[in-house]
């Protein structure tokens, strides 16, 4: 039986007495241990960034269930580790079974205290742009999504770090609000997957529903709709898209206390309707008396990541724009 009490989890994890499972990009776990080496018993295909005492070590690649050697030659004493999931699990999940040595009382840098921004928790909901799909590729045609995605450097993580907040990245490549890219898996759009702890397990019937009491963000960023308008048509009717967006916002309001929503849009090829639709949604929300919404248009010109997604540099620029937007929202709230 695994004791996970001394581990701090970030992102959505399903915990039981045997293991901890996740599908989420940039999901990570932090813990302290005493010893000169570290091994992790894990299962599932993924790439992980390993940080010990704030220093990045060689990448960890996992697949079959076994004990993976993570670090050796450490100084004696207590160390703090943070293990980041760099890849997305579109199908299936990854699992942690044990750490060796066992964890001690955590000395992680993650806390639930309010940061200087007044924001302790922030959530990012979206598709491949929010995953960080292919952001580490050297050009749009070299590599695969598995080898070139570094979710630990997506715009959401970078924004959260600027704010000093803990975060959750709930993003699903190829998925839309009303319909998915090229109408793939039509029954599993973003709002449907979002209800589950493990997006990659939900269509297989092996994911619990998410317990929304575990995370109550002050800001929720929605970057949804790219896949509704991308690729070959037919695309959604405008009214259907607007209605689905409003319904999703209302559902989020039911789950959380009183978050501010940042509705993000960008240019979409070949049908560039998303900015217009999000602006319409914003106008309708304001007309309903909902003052908890704002719109941020992110320019994403010359995307040089895999399959013409934003690359690492572009994610940094997106994070800076979003950070300034959220900072402005926070200042406005304090002045009211």
Image: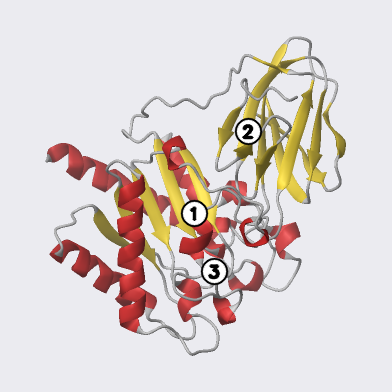
Q: Position of residue 223 (x, y in %)?
A: 43, 62
Residue 272: image quadrant is: bottom left
Q: Residues within 10 Å of mark 3 (few under 14, many from 20)?
A: many
Position of 102 with respect to 228 (left or right) is right
Q: Secondary structure at mark 1?
A: loop
In the rendered image, the quadrant that contains the C terminus is: top left
Q: Earlier in the sequence, mark 1 or mark 2?
A: 2
The residue nearer to you, when weighing 208 against 189, is: 208
Q: Give the spatial CA distance, label 1 vs label 2.
A: 22 Å
Q: Give the spatial CA distance, label 3 vs label 1.
A: 14 Å
Q: Give the spatial CA distance, label 3 vs label 2.
A: 26 Å
Q: How is the image coloured?
A: secondary structure
Which of labels 1 and 2 is toward the front? Answer: 1
Q: Position of residue 16 (x, y in %)?
A: 66, 33
Numbered label attached to residue 195: 1
Q: Secondary structure at mark 3?
A: loop
Position of 262 with respect to 287 (left or right) is right
Q: Residue at x 68, y 69 (%)?
A: 139
Decide: is 210 above or below 263. above
Decide: is 210 above or below 275. above
Q: Is residue 161 visible?
A: no
Q: Earlier in the sequence, mark 3 or mark 1?
A: 3
Q: Is residue 146 visible?
A: yes
Count of marks, rendered view? 3
Q: Earlier in the sequence, mark 3 or mark 2?
A: 2
Do callouts 1 and 2 mark residues in contact (Cβ within 8 Å)? no
Numbered label attached to residue 175: 3
Q: Residues within 10 Å of mark 1 (few under 14, many from 20)?
A: some
Q: Position of residue 45 (x, y in %)?
A: 78, 51
Circle 2 sits on which residue? 29
């Amino acid at each position: 039986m695994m004791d996970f009490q001394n581990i701090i989890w970030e992102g959505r994890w399903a915990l039981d007495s045997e293991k901890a499972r996740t599908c989420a990009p940039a999901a990570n776990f932090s813990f302290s241990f005493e010893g000169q080496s570290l091994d992790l018993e894990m299962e599932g295909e993924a790439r992980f960034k390993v940080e010990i005492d704030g220093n990045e070590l060689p990448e960890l690649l996992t697949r079959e269930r076994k004990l993976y050697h993570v670090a050796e030659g450490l100084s004696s004493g207590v160390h703090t580790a943070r293990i980041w999931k760099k890849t997305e699990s579109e199908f299936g999940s990854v699992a942690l079974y044990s750490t060796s040595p066992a964890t001690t009382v955590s000395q992680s840098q993650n806390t639930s205290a309010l940061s200087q921004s007044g924001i302790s928790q922030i959530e990012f909901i979206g598709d491949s742009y929010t995953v960080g799909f292919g952001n580490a590729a050297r050009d749009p045609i070299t590599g695969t999504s598995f080898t070139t995605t570094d979710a630990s450097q997506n715009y959401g993580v970078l924004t959260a770090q600027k704010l000093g907040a803990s975060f959750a990245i709930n993003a699903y490549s190829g998925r839309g609000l009303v319909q998915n890219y090229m109408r793939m898996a039509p029954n599993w759009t973003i709002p449907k997957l979002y209800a589950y702890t493990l997006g990659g397990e939900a269509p297989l019937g092996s994911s619990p529903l998410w317990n929304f009491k575990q995370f109550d963000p002050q800001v929720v960023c929605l970057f949804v709709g790219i896949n509704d308008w991308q690729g070959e048509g037919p695309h959604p009717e405008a009214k259907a898209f607007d209605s689905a967006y409003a319904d999703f916002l209302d559902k989020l309001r039911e789950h959380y206390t009183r978050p501010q929503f940042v509705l993000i849009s960008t240019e979409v090829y070949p049908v560039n309707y998303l900015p217009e639709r999000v602006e319409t949604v914003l106008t309708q929300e304001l007309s309903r008396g909902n003052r908890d919404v704002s719109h941020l248009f992110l320019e994403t010109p010359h995307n040089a990541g895999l399959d013409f997604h934003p690359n690492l540099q572009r994610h940094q620029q997106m994070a800076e724009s979003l950070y300034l937007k959220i900072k402005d929202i926070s200042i406005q709230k304090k002045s009211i």
